[in-house]
């Protein structure tokens, strides 16, 4: 059998001429052993090494006569052009006359390695490229040379550099693996998703495919060759999706079930793999998807591209799984959308079991890889469901007075409204199991709120007759907010910016307050470190409540009266003031706030601004009044807050009244009633869901109206929500005081700790309801159980009557925290009564009183060991201690007192914003017995 004649193309001929032309000595004929490809160009030009180009003609001859004829014809027709003749004629058969015309006087055998050196401008090649198993590489490099040529090296062309260049061109990954870039599966999986990407590999010669696969396996691991085999089999575009599904087999290398193995095998289309390869491939796919998901969480074009890549893969994987009935087997897969939906179904089942089971199920939902970036609203909705379940597991709250109820609403029940509203809006993806569970929870929570509104309305009847601005009975009235909240701020330091968010409910206040204080730009201040809540006038509409709020007295009026009375109120108290309504706020095009408003905030006067965004949403539906409400969603609020902060001003965020939502969108028909005056109030006798109110706090119809307390009632055509009734959400007026720092706090005011406004059930570490919310009578518990079908906790009752004094709103001496144990039993008092504490105290100058230290320890212990810095300060002031000028200072003193021998009993955590107590370490260092430490 004769020797194999290599097929040559223009690249090879060009490379040979680059090598031999400089030494040609004027000769124009070059014989090359081989066969010139029929499709290759027969005439082209090459550099001559002196800055010019010479024409080259290529012919093929199979005999000496053919070579001679080709040469003679070329000389006659093309003069000084070069002629290259490819042939398989041996040198000894060529005549002497031709040998004298030939370059090198012999037939040149192609040395592909030398050509590669020329193409890369390399001084030499890695010697491995001239041996097995890399003998295929030079020919591949010659064939793959890009139009613009290979990058010039100037030194030795290493095997690694050659392979990086080849893979870049062959797979369409130019530049990805150049230089010292990591060769990883991430880029290969992204490549497999590109249209036509896998096809580029599938058409390569088998030897080149194997060589590339071997090199990638060495650099990127066992996942690479399996990915390439999938590409060769036409499964490249599905490779990443198949990697997700292969988790059914890859855990141990053995099939989890025969059916799953057969199903996956049908998808892999006969592609062979080692168990270790499959495990590596699955792991690589999951790692790459995790990184893509992280990229998708950002903003910009790249994030959007990553998002599309992820969605394409996971949706394809779900479709493939469904096609072979693998969806059920892959229910726990943390990447598949079907797996996320299955986790929600498990949560739905857990909601009917217990709050702890629901919490665990929600954490499983949150752990799904797609949860934070692709389903954040659905995860948050599920979280609200769990919170609402925890609220329903609390002792049934009671209503003993109007003031107690509005305070409890702002710091507790309004948070339940926040969760309830989101649950009513429902999941964006309809699922009967999840929808049914959410619906049951919503109905049970709404029924509880219905009973609270009913009890509140009953208290409101007598209170409305008795309460007056000068005799409020210990309650904060809406017309007294300027005098009791804004005026102390104006007298203490910078005059406040009073922002009236008409229609803001306790639920909206909870959202806005949480957002504003979470960034650290604002702190919340309050008398005694507490958030206040005021009681609205009746009917709870803008013309009554906002006019009275801004006038400092009960009055009916519109914007003109509000402006006049606001200025007059502050003049009476030796302050200049200005008030801006909706039409007074916007500036010219290109600016947000009018110059007059900005100037007023910069001056030393009290400034009031009325924002109607929330109230208008009820009538016009620009945004569902259920929110979620953010600072940015309230028109002009971000600009106002930024301007106030730049001037060091405190800000009073206050509502004029709240609202109730129309939660039954299918019923736009108003309730049948006579003597209708507005959406939620009328005249005439009261019926079911209504209450008759009269007295000085009723400013319409001569001081007597009938108001709806039930959310289900409205007398006018359907809208997104209504105001004017006697429900807690309408009558409770949240009052938030924000400041850039506590330096503007009046005497007796302090930072409001998060624990005093966020109910204990809101997060997992749910504690019993705050002590200022009294237990209800057994009949209310039974009534709730009968109406909802739920079984609330047993409620401790007492024979002692509950009145306004025993159920008053929280004060500095009665903070909304878990009640501390009796002094002789508490952990804190046990600690400060030890000799070890006495020894520690001897080395601390100006140590706080024992009762202060005991109170802080007990507050931390009651909270599970961790409190915000503001809550620790509140515990100090509640025990009779002085609020420190630097909150961190009290913790520094406590570390000296309690960190015996340097052990961390107490310290600051979370960038010095929270305080942590190590209970076990405390008991050990102060040599308390388990019983003394309060441990059973």
Image (tube, grey):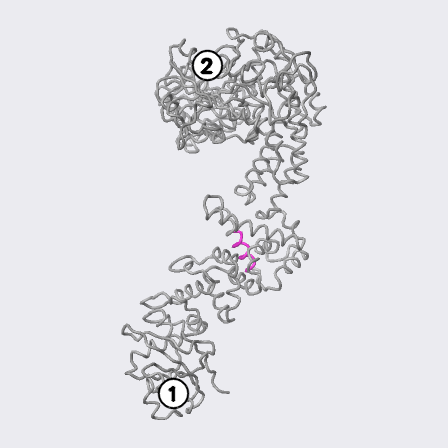
Residue 32, image x, y percentages: 39, 83
Instruction: Between label 2 and label 1, give the one nearer the viewer.
Output: 1
Residue 815, image x, y percentages: 50, 19
Name the residue: 37% across, 87% down. Answer: 71
34 sits to left or right of 18? right
Residue 482 badge: 2
Dot 2: what SS?
A: helix
Nearer to us in this view, 404 or 709: 709
Nearer to us in this view, 879 or 608: 608
Residue 73 badge: 1
Residue 610, image x, y percentages: 47, 21
654 sits to left or right of 741? right
Nearer to us in this view, 897 or 26: 26
Q: Quadrant of residue 724?
A: top right
Decide if residue 429 is in sight here.
yes
Dot 1: what SS?
A: helix
Q: Report the span colored magenta.
A: 276-286
Magenta stretch holds residue 277: yes
Q: Quadrant of residue 590?
A: top left
Q: Residues within 10 Å of mark 1 (few under 14, many from 20)?
A: few
């Amino acid at each position: 059998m004769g020797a194999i004649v290599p097929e040559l193309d223009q690249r090879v001929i060009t490379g040979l001429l680059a090598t031999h032309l400089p030494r040609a000595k004027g000769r124009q004929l070059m014989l090359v052993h081989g066969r010139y490809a029929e499709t290759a160009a027969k005439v082209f030009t090459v550099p001559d090494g002196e800055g010019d180009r010479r024409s080259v003609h290529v012919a093929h001859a199979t005999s000496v006569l053919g070579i001679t004829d080709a040469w003679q014809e070329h000389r006659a027709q093309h003069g000084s052009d070069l002629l290259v003749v490819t042939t398989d004629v041996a040198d000894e058969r060529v005549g002497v006359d031709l040998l004298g015309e030939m370059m090198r006087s012999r037939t040149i055998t192609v040395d592909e390695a030398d050509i590669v050196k020329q193409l890369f401008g390399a001084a030499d090649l890695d010697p491995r490229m001239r041996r097995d198993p890399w003998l295929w590489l030079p020919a591949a490099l010659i064939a793959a040379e890009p139009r613009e040529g290979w990058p010039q090296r100037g030194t030795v062309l290493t095997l690694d550099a050659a392979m990086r260049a080849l893979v870049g061109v062959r797979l369409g990954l130019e530049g990805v693996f150049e230089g010292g870039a990591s060769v990883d599966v991430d880029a290969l999986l992204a490549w497999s998703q590109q249209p036509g990407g896998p096809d580029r590999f599938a058409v390569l010669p088998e030897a080149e495919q194997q060589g590339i696969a071997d090199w990638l396996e060495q650099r990127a691991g066992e996942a690479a060759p399996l990915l390439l085999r999938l590409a060769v089999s036409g499964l490249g575009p599905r490779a990443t999706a198949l990697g997700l599904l292969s988790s059914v087999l890859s855990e141990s290398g053995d099939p989890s079930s025969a059916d799953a193995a057969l199903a996956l095998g049908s998808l892999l289309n006969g592609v062979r793999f080692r168990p270790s390869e499959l495990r590596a491939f699955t792991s690589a796919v999951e790692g790459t998807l995790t990184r893509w998901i992280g990229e998708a969480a950002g903003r910009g074009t790249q994030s959007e591209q990553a998002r599309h890549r992820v969605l394409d893969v996971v949706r394809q994987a779900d479709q493939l799984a469904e096609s072979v009935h693998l969806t059920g087997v892959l229910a726990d897969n943390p990447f598949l959308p079907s797996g996320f939906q299955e986790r929600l179904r498990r949560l739905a089942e857990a909601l009917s079991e217990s709050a702890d089971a629901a919490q665990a199920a929600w954490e499983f939902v949150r752990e799904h890889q797609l949860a934070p970036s692709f389903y954040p609203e659905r995860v948050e909705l599920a979280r609200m469901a769990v919170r609402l379940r925890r609220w329903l597991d609390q002792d049934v709250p009671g209503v003993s007075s109007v003031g107690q109820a509005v305070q409890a609403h702002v710091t507790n029940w309004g948070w339940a409204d926040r969760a309830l509203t989101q649950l009513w809006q429902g999941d964006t993806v309809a699922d009967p199991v999840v929808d049914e569970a959410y619906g049951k929870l919503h109905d049970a929570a709404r029924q509880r709120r219905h009973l609270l509104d009913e009890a509140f309305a009953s208290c409101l009847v007598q209170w409305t007759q008795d309460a007056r601005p000068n005799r409020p009975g210990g309650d904060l009235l809406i017309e007294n907010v300027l005098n009791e909240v804004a005026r102390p701020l104006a007298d203490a330091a910078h005059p406040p910016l009073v922002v009236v968010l008409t229609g803001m409910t306790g639920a909206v206040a909870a959202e806005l307050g949480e957002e504003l204080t979470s960034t650290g730009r604002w702190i919340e201040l309050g008398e005694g470190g507490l958030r206040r809540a005021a009681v609205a006038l009746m009917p709870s509409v803008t013309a009554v409540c906002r006019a009275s709020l801004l006038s400092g007295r009960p009055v009916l009026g519109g914007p003109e009266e509000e402006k006049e009375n606001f200025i007059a109120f502050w003049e009476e108290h030796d302050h200049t003031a200005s008030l801006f309504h909706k039409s007074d706020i916007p500036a010219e095009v290109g600016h947000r706030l009018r110059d007059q408003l900005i100037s007023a905030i910069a001056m030393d006067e009290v400034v009031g601004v009325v924002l109607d965004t929330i109230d208008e949403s009820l009538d016009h539906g620009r945004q569902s009044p259920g929110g979620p409400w953010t600072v940015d969603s309230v028109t002009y609020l971000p600009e106002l807050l930024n301007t106030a902060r730049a001037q060091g001003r405190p800000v009073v965020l206050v509502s004029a009244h709240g609202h109730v939502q129309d939660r039954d969108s299918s019923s736009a028909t108003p309730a049948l009633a006579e003597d209708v005056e507005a959406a939620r109030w009328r005249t005439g006798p009261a019926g079911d869901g209504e209450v008759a109110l009269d007295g000085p706090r009723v400013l319409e119809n001569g001081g007597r109206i009938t108001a709806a307390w039930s959310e289900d009632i409205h007398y006018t055509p359907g809208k997104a929500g209504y105001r004017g009734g006697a429900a807690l959400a309408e009558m409770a007026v949240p009052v938030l005081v924000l400041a850039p720092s506590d330096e503007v706090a009046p005497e007796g005011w302090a930072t409001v700790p998060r624990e005093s406004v966020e109910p204990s059930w809101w997060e997992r570490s749910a504690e019993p309801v705050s002590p200022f919310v009294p237990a209800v009578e057994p009949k209310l518990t039974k009534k709730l159980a009968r109406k909802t079908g739920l079984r609330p906790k047993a409620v401790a009752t007492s024979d002692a009557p509950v009145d306004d004094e025993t159920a008053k709103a929280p004060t500095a001496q009665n903070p909304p925290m878990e009640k501390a144990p009796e002094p002789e039993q508490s952990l804190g008092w046990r600690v400060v009564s030890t000799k070890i504490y006495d020894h520690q105290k001897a080395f601390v100058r100006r140590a706080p009183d024992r009762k202060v230290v005991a109170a802080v320890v007990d507050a931390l212990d009651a909270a599970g060991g961790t409190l915000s810095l503001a809550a620790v300060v509140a515990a100090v002031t509640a025990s009779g201690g002085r609020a420190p000028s630097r909150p961190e200072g009290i913790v520094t003193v406590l570390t000296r007192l309690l960190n015996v021998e340097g052990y961390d009993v107490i310290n600051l955590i979370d960038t010095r914003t929270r305080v942590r107590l190590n209970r076990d370490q405390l008991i050990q260092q102060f040599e308390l017995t388990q019983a003394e430490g309060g441990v059973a």
